[in-house]
Each structure stands twice: as C-alpha cells, then as structure tokens.
Image: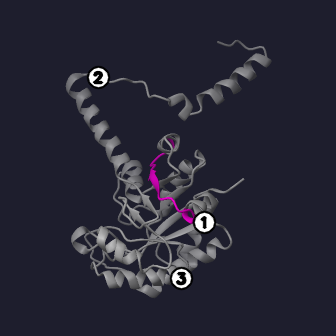
Amino acid sequence: MTSQAQKLRDLINGTEHFVAAEAYSALTGRIVESVGFKAAYLGGHACSAFHYAVPDNSVFSQIEQLDQAERIAEVMDIPLIADADTLGETVADAFHFTRKYIRAGIAGYHVEDEVNPKHSKFAGGLISIPDMQFRIDAAARARGDHPFVIIARCDEMYNENRGGGGQSNVEEAIKRGKAYAEAGADVLTFPIASPEATAQIAAEMPVPVCTLGMDMPGTLFTLSTGWGWTGAAQLHMARAKELMETGTVKMDHVLEGKDKLIQQDVYDALILDWATKTGRKTR
C-alpha cells in the first residue's frame, strides 16, 4: 500500500498544480476528500483556535497539533500536510516531533523560522540561517529514508507590521530559501509575499515553492486555509444568536452525504450481520 507521504511526493513530482484544502477535523478531512481534493492541510491557527480556543503564538503545542492531525489523517486516503510551527525550541525537539508526525501517518509538514513566541507582541524576528538549517537537518535525520515531506517556511516576507518576524527583503528571502533547501527541505513557502515577489523568489529556488492561502503562478501547490474553520465559527455564532433571540434555529438539519462521510453503512452492516447470525432482534 502506498503511504500518504509517498502520495504527497508523487503529487509534488508531478506537473499539475494542486490545492491542499483546509481540514481542521476528521469530518472536514472526509469532506475535502469527498469533493475531489488530492491533499488536505491542517493550519496551526485553524487547529489552535477551533479546538483549543487559544492563539497560535507558541502557547499551542506540537502535542495538541499532533493529536488533531492524527485523527484527520486516519480517516482519509489523501495525504495531510500539517503546520508544525517551529517544531519546538531545539534540534532535539525537531528530531523528536518529526518522528512523531511520521508515526502518526502525516504526509508532511511545514516548519518555520520565527523566534518564539511567534506572531505575538514580542518582535523576536527570525532565527539565524545556521540555526534553521540545523532544525531542518534534524528533521531530515529523523525522516531517514521515509518519504515524509519537509516544507521549510521562511517568514522573511511576513514583516513586523503584519505580525511576522521578517523585513520583507526579497534578497534575504532568496538567501534563506537556498540555505533551507541545502539543509534538506523538499519544498519552500514564503507567506505574505506578493505575486511579484513570489515569482522572483521562486525563480531562484533549487526546489519547488508552494503558497500559503492563495494560488500564485509559478508555484507547485497551495496550502489553503482560513475559509473552513472561520466559516464554521461564523455560522455557529449566527445560529447561537438566533437561538438565544428567538428560541429556535430555522435550518435544514440534514447534512447531505452525512451517512457516507461517517461510514454509517459500514457499521450498520456490521451490526446487522452480528445481530442476525446470533438470533437477535433487528430492524
């Protein structure tokens, strides 16, 4: 049987642009697979906010991310890419958590170069290029011969005004990208970079480039996130307010395709077979 990681590698080695669609739960993983996406993506903020109601600024742990990622990967046949944040604080953390992601059946992850606590009021900037290289090298050592995909996320284009740690210097992004690829990254991503900057950076990279959030020409695939969990939360908020204000929620309670999504027929058949063969009452 082809591993999920190998399926992701096959997609990366192909020529067709693909989208890894947001899946922040097991059910949404099944949904994106059912509508035809070839890969799925679990973002850190999607997971931290939706499942734990905390921000994605280092208070949210890799153990919590792994817990949800494994649940999603287990119910799908398409590969799941996870947001692995900084993989902890040390090269030992990077090695340890990479092995855990592989054992959990995750196809790949992206690891970033911000200083913790990232995306917070602390303007910590980015870690040094050598430290990020060692982080990627530790992940590559943990992977060994396994086809697990390592995506290096460079936040140089994600500047402080946007809540990131970079300075929006294209030349620095190119320098970092090349160094990360040299250390063992299979794919690179440069969040917040404009289409023009992305094209300029991608042209210099020795490995493929993917984008986070939006499709861009010249990139291999897109990690699509934000629309799923926020949409679900917005809908829940609206319906909660409706229930509070009116005492009822006017909606169709039927989820189209629900039985197939949760494999109702599989479990019904199993129980019916057991009940019939043991002389128990059925319906």
**Between discs 2 and 1, the one toward the N terminus:** 1
Residue drawn at (36%, 61%), measured in percent from left and top? 56
Q: Is residue 45 left or right of residue 238?
A: right
- For residue 183, the mark is 3
Tell me whether the residue at label 1 lies in contact with that at label 3, contact meaning CB atoms closer than 8 angstroms: no
Quick one: label 3, few (<14), some, or many (20+) residues within 10 Å?
many
Seen in the picture, residue 282 relative to 196 is either above or below; the reply is: above
Q: Name the residue under label 2.
A: 250
Give the amino acid at mark 3: Ala
Tell which circle, 2 or 3, labels the residue nearer the N-terminal end: 3
Circle 1 packing at 10 Å, graded few (<14), some (14-19), many (20+), is many
In the displayed structure, would residue 40 be above or below residue 269?
below
Q: Which mark is residue 44?
A: none
The residues colored magenta run: 12-27
Image location (x, y in percent) of residue 160: 24, 74
User: From mark 2 to mark 3, how far is it between C-alphas?
Assistant: 55 Å
* Badge 1 element: loop
* Tag 2–tag 1 contact (CB < 8 Å): no
Question: Of the numbered discs in the image, which one, if any, rests on residue 148?
Answer: 1
